[in-house]
Image (cartoon, rainbow, N blue to C red):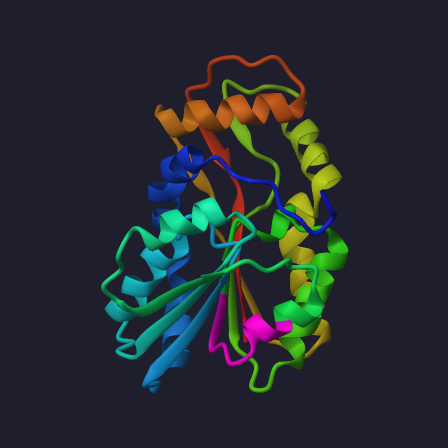
Amino acid sequence: MTETELENFDPDWLALREPVDHSTRSRRLEGLLAARLADRDRVRVVDLGAGSGSTLRHLAPRLLELGVGAAQDWVLVDHDEALLSRALAVPVDAAASVATTRVDLGDRDALSDVLSGADVVVGSALLDVLPAPVATGLVEVLSTLDPRPAVLFVLTVAGGASTEPDVPGAAEAFDADQRAHGLGPDATGFVAEAFAAHGWSVERDATPWRLGPSPLLDAWARGWFTAAGVSGRPVSAAVVPHEDLLAQ
């Protein structure tokens, strides 16, 4: 596996987290994005790391709800073709068209081609799994586009998760494991600084998961304890910090 490949995510995990993801996203940043698009007749949206299409299913109708009447043309980008096929299987009335493509996010030429002409670039739970050189290259490619799109990256892991009951040392161990595989909890700050260095205006909002007893909490806790290298134990609640970022 090359450094620019992302891991394949379990579609059952993605389906389990989707309702919480949709309810957690920053409504303020979505409103700012909608205001930018208010006078458009047609909007081209490129979704990086699109997976099974969760962002499409949330944001396409959300923009319509916020008064964006433009036809929406979505391009879903992912390295996992099986997940992309699931995205196409669910129709979204707000989208005028949906296409998929496989692109290595570390290939700047291919990335530039797929992003060309985009009005909006989005990504969910993406930045934290990227290596620093790939994230830097992504911002640099976005910064060469003329005109520049709006960029909305959501649900980036922010670190410092907590559980009830508390498990001493688990959060620190999990965050260290995340940093060993990508930017981890440093991702939003790293990318925000990169955008600012290229003259973008950046807005950030905290978007934590607040999980009570549920299958999602159970699944998250199992993965969290495994990555942290500590013995799993029952938890009754968790707060999992995430952050959303809008660059314009």
All told, the count of numbered labels is 0
Q: Is residue 159 left or right of residue 107?
A: left
> Is residue 117 part of the magenta span, yes or no?
yes
- Residue 223, horizontal then vertical, whole percent: 55, 26
Query: Could you say which is closer to the camera, residue 180 or residue 165?
Result: 180
- Residue 58, horizontal then vertical, whole percent: 33, 56
Query: Could you say which is closer to the camera, residue 181 or residue 213?
Result: 181
- Residue 194, horizontal then vertical, whole percent: 71, 67
- Residue 101, horizontal then vertical, whole percent: 50, 61
Residue 231 occupies quadrant? top right
Q: Which span of residues is magenta-colored? A: 112-121
Where does the N terminus fall, quadrant-wise?
A: top right
Query: Could you say which is closer to the camera, residue 77 or residue 241?
Result: 77
Residue depicted at x 53% and y 49%: 125
Residue depicted at x 37% and y 47%: 86
Residue 141 occupies quadrant? bottom right
Q: Is residue 240 visible?
A: yes
The answer to whether residue 194 is above or below residue 229 is below
Q: Is residue 238 left or right of residue 1?
A: left
Q: Is residue 213 left or right of residue 179?
A: left
Residue depicted at x 53% and y 54%: 78
Residue 105 occupies quadrant? bottom right
Q: Is residue 195 visible?
A: no
The answer to whether residue 4 is above or below residue 150 is above
Where does the C terminus fall, quadrant-wise?
A: bottom right
The answer to whether residue 129 is above or below residue 170 is below
> Is residue 98 part of the magenta span, yes or no?
no
The answer to whether residue 80 is above or below residue 121 is above
